Amino acid sequence: MSVVIERPLERIALIRLNRPEARNALNQETRMQLAAAFDQLGADPEVRCVVLTGSDKVFAAGADIRDLSERSAVEMMLRNTHRLWQAIADCPKPVIAAVNGLALGGGCELAMHADIIVAGEGAAFGQPEVRIGIMPGAGGTQRLTRAVGKFRAMKMVLTGQPVGAREALEMGLASEVVADEQVQARALELAAEIAALPPLAVMQIKEVVLAGQDASLDSALALERKAFQLLFASSDQKEGMRAFLDKRKPEYVGQ
């Protein structure tokens, strides 16, 4: 299996890319396994947060060029790869990318499908597709621009030059940077913190943030307002506020 699912902590799933011989390059089979994993975990009520990672040397070095070099345009279209990426984007649970080493091309695009990116000091992010005669095809021109702005995104996609972890953090392409050996531990720590919070509120926050990005401010505020009001129908809202008033730790059940 090129994608492995682990359960390192209660309520937390870890998806690990497992193609060390190919630096975790994303061939079609790996994309299919990733989509299936996210579909499965997104529907699992026992999972409240997902951590996505590679190895301690490389997150994902991009698409598998050997698999692509002789493909025709029609073959590429019939692959419907966008549907596999959409399964990741549609995951209702928070996703934390734990990035060590290279996150290039499809690997960078994969990391950008996450909600939080924890990068190691030695991590590098880039969209080098232009250097082999193509361009990003899984969000690299769109998600990157939304994350870091036009001018920095243009520099990355037009030159293919990668950026290091500290520059990625400064430009908004990472949430935080830690020592390489602490990446997975820190990602799991964040996941545990999120998993202890009310899951309905967490999922509503993710949905509204993502849906509101491309809406007008008025429409986005309406989405936020309705989601806020809806949470008052949950038992977790009652539990959270009562626990606050009682000065005790709340127990959230996702109802």
Image (cartoon, grey):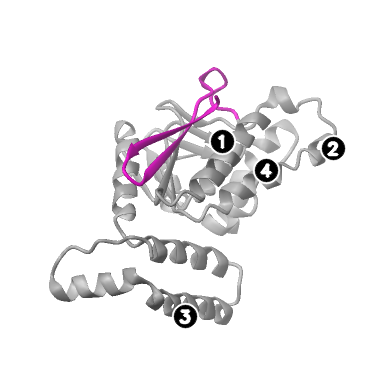
* Tag nearer the camera, 1 or 2: 2
Between 101 and 130, the one lying in front of the other is 101
Q: Distance between the Cα atoms at labels 4 and 3? A: 35 Å
* Mark 3 in CB contact with mark 2 (< 8 angstroms): no
Task: From the image, tell me which residue sits under label 3.
Answer: 225
- Badge 4 or badge 3: first in the primary sequence: 4
- Badge 4 or badge 2: first in the primary sequence: 2
Answer with left or right where residue 178 lies relative to residue 170: left
The picture places residue 30, in percent across and down from the top left corner, at 61, 31
- Badge 3 or badge 2: first in the primary sequence: 2
The picture places residue 86, in percent across and down from the top left corner, at 63, 50
Quadrant of the rendered structure where residue 12 is?
top left
> Please, what is the three-letter code of the amino acid marked with disc 2?
Ala
Quarter occupied by the C terminus:
bottom left
> Please, what is the three-letter code of the amino acid marked with disc 3?
Arg
Q: Secondary structure at mark 1?
A: strand
Task: From the image, tell me which residue sits under label 4.
Answer: 136
- Badge 1 or badge 2: first in the primary sequence: 2
Circle 4 packing at 10 Å, graded few (<14), some (14-19), many (20+), is some
* Tag nearer the camera, 4 or 2: 2
- Badge 3 or badge 1: first in the primary sequence: 1
Residue 230 forms part of the magenta stretch: no
